[in-house]
Amino acid sequence: MTAIKQSSVIQENKQYALDLCPVTYVMEKIGGYWKPIIIYHLAGGPKRYSELKRAIPAITEKVLIQHLKQLEEDHLVVRESKPVVPPFVTYRLSKAGQGLQAVIDAMETWAVKDKAGKFRK
């Protein structure tokens, strides 16, 4: 992976936007296609990796692992591992991740209304 030059103008502009714009901050944390979907499925309670993979069959294993790690680094998801053989690992939303529930619910509500409106035309 290529190192990001922290002193670049692009990085300065990005940091400026993160500091001033709440939407930019949220999108930095949960932006992209898969992260909101992962959060949506974890809102129902703790899940094992295999349960998430079954719930989101279109996601590749690599991407699911990467996004779970990123969500964990951003303190939105907690990874709990029990020291047994075979390993027993679960993922759950942290307090901060639970705070996103209203955002995910609003996205779901909007999608249902928008899809319904498209069929009425």
Image (cartoon, helix red, strand yellow):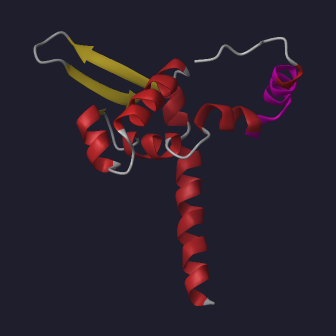
Report the quarter where the N terminus lies.
Answer: top right
Residue at the (31%, 18%) spot, across then down: 80
Q: Position of residue 64 (x, y in %)?
A: 40, 35
Q: Position of residue 62 (x, y in %)?
A: 39, 32
Q: Residue furthest front?
A: 2
Q: Quadrant of residue 83?
A: top left
Q: With respect to residue 75, does 49 lie above or below?
A: below
Residue at the (52%, 59%) spot, across then down: 108
Report the quarter where the C terminus lies.
Answer: bottom right
Q: Quadrant of residue 9?
A: top right
Residue 19 in the figure: left or right of residue 88: right
Q: With respect to residue 112, does 41 lie above or below?
A: above
Residue 99 in the figure: left or right of residue 37: right
Residue 83 in the figure: left or right of residue 2: left
Q: Does 51 lie within the magenta span?
A: no
Q: Does 15 lie within the magenta span?
A: yes
Q: Position of residue 100 (x, y in %)?
A: 56, 39
Residue 82 in the figure: left or right of residue 67: left
Which residues are the magenta region?
Answer: 11-23
Residue nearest the observer in this picture, 100 or 37? 37
Q: How many numbered markers are drawn? A: 0
Q: With respect to residue 53, does 81 lie above or below?
A: above
* Residue 49 visible in the displayed image: yes
* Residue 94 visible in the displayed image: no
Residue at the (61%, 80%) spot, across then down: 117
Q: Quadrant of residue 51?
A: top left
